Image (cartoon, rainbow, N blue to C red):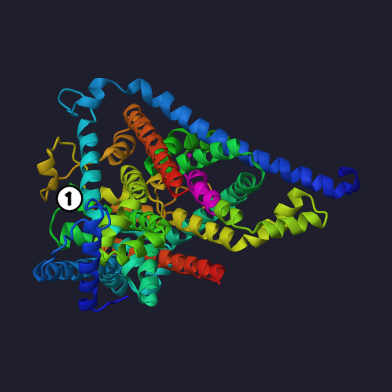
Amino acid sequence: MQISSTTESKQKKESGKRLASGDGETTFYSVTGPSLSEKKQKRKNIAERVMGGIFFVCGMIAIAFVLFITIFLVTSGVPAIGKIGITDFLFGSVWASTAAEPKFGILPFILTSVYGTIGAIIIAVPIGLLCAIFLAKMATNKIASLIRAAVELLAGIPSVVYGLVGMIVIVPMIRNVFNLSDGANLLSAIIVLSVMVLPNVISVSETALLAVPKEYEEASLALGATWTETVFKVSVPAASSGIASAVVLGVGRAIGEAMAVMMVSGNVANMPGLFKSVRFLTTAIASEMSYCSGLQRQALFSIALVLFIFIMIITLLLNFVFKSKKE
Amino acid sequence: MHEKISLSRRVKIKVINILMYISFVLILALVAGLIGYILYRGLPNISWKFLSSKPSLLKGVIGILPNILNTVYIVLITLVIVLPLGVGTAVYLNEYATNRKLVSVIEFASETLAGIPSIIYGLAGMLIFVQFCSIGTSLLAGSLTLVIMTLPTIVRTTQESLKTVPDSYREGSLALGSGKWHMIRTVVLPSSIDGIVTGCILAIGRIVGESAALLFTAGMANNILSIKDAVTPGNAGSTLTVALYMYAKERGEFGVAFAIAAILLILTLVINLSAKLVAKKLKVKTD
């Protein structure tokens, strides 16, 4: 792409002349007059080079941000793990950060996050996938745009609003239905999370389903399959990698959600049980951050580091899935 | 034609169709129920006084004016910083970069940023801006945190619309003797302005709805700040979402919380609608 500057300037002078004889108002090249002095040209070359440099810096900034976040999380998360001991930290089942003899085992948080995410995915994926199939392959345009608007709204609602509705509607409901003393438990969190994951699952799988080549479906129809059979036996398998990435994206959203979960899960550091008040990795950080100090504070950063590693694994997985689709 | 299909096939098809209808109705009912319930609980609590006063324990007044202002400030500050950065990144990726490996690394970094949960942004923002840069818990630190968070959104939408600018435009401009930057400024960016606007709207949506990243960076204060206070370090303030959380979780003022939820819901609707309108305009243009 690099043209040497002398030929470039020659071209510019010529084009400048030609343009000036035509109309001077052209939007493509309004700066150059018929007599472009060498000085002006030089200044423009410098501007070009400076802007190129600025864009390069902009391009690097995303990498810099990721590096910054990684470095800060690692440097503030590792010391506590060193002090507590990695096995005691990851596999200790008691979290008593403010006790006289503090214990920092985050196994309850890890398991709660894993169970909560699995639960949300088990509820959200079948519903979301069926809805996406309906949306992409069955619905008329009007109904499709209605569902799409609904899904976009679900995706846009702030997580605290979900938390509030969960707190006022879901938690009392769970308490009454299952005759519990407190409805703020893992089940309530799973229900709220599944609603929050739904839009991700629907929109990503819909995109994947829409990208399936028409020929596949036509071939299946020509062989005598009905439309429903075609969609489920041809289109869905053909879109499977996209659907898989929808699920992984949903996992990422569920495992990283903090505020909504904090409002409905009861926030006690128990080992997970469907009807027990629990604490997730995210809420463990959020609930103690405002009053912590010393080793407790460092341990919270270590939890963040664990969560970050989970998320990085998901991102890598996602990249891998998308990449294999491209090939 | 249906007579020729065996009974078991027909039953299977019927069952699957019914399941699909159920899931579709379920989602519509869910959305309708959510909207209805939030507005029903929230709208009666919204009054002019509620919107235009600051909360005072002495007078027993609850108002959300400071939270509205803080939200506006954070949106403005974040956009002013993230817009040039995000558009610049997209321009670099689409127009300048020649090294494929570097491009894939940048794109991977951007995807990583998009996947990081907001609570981690909150912690990272606290470590980097509040402590390391010693800005203190403030609107500025919150905005800077959100800059990192919304960067991928701006990059992605801008890049998508840069891709729709036909190469003939670029070639035409270059053939007339324009330099690369001149071409980008006068031809490429103006033709992809709609994508940039869409990115902005999506970013605004994300900022307005964000809470976990702001809890430890922007703080929980409820004072009325001027725009000048907002950009000076050390002035904390809570946005609408953080205020909602505090009212619901810490103070049990559910009426106030639902009023804020209703406002947030209406904002979300407006943001979605305007994003759609801009996207439609974009489509008409490229056709």
User: Magenta span: helix, strand or loop, mainly?
Assistant: helix
Q: Which residue sits at x=53%, y=61%?
A: A245
Question: In which chain is the residue bearing label 1?
Answer: B
User: The N terminus of chain A lies in which quarter of the figure?
Assistant: bottom left
Q: Whole-percent x and y of residue A115? A: 52, 56
Above or below: residue A34 compared with residue A196: below
Q: Whole-percent x and y of residue A224? A: 83, 54
Q: Is residue A292 in sight in this rendering? A: no
Q: Which residue is mark 1?
A: B140
Above or below: residue B233 compared with residue A57: above
Side (left or right) of A295 relative to A153: left
- Which amino acid type is shown beneath numbered disc 1? Leu
Q: Which residue sits at x=13%, y=55%?
A: B135
Above or below: residue B102 compared with residue B234: below
Q: Is residue B9 in sight in this rendering? A: yes
Q: How many marks are shown on the rendered structure?
A: 1
Q: Which residue sits at x=43%, y=41%?
A: B276
Q: Whole-percent x and y of residue B149? A: 31, 55
Place residue A40 in its image quadrant: bottom left
Side (left or right) of A183 relative to B49: right
Q: Whole-percent x and y of residue B40? A: 43, 24
Side (left or right) of B59 relative to B269: left
User: The C terminus of chain A lies in which quarter of the figure?
Assistant: bottom right
Boundaries of the magenta span:
A183-204
Above or below: residue B122 compared with residue A153: below
Q: Which residue sits at x=17%, y=56%?
A: B130
Q: B176 or B240: nearer the eye? A: B176
Residue A307 forms part of the magenta stretch: no
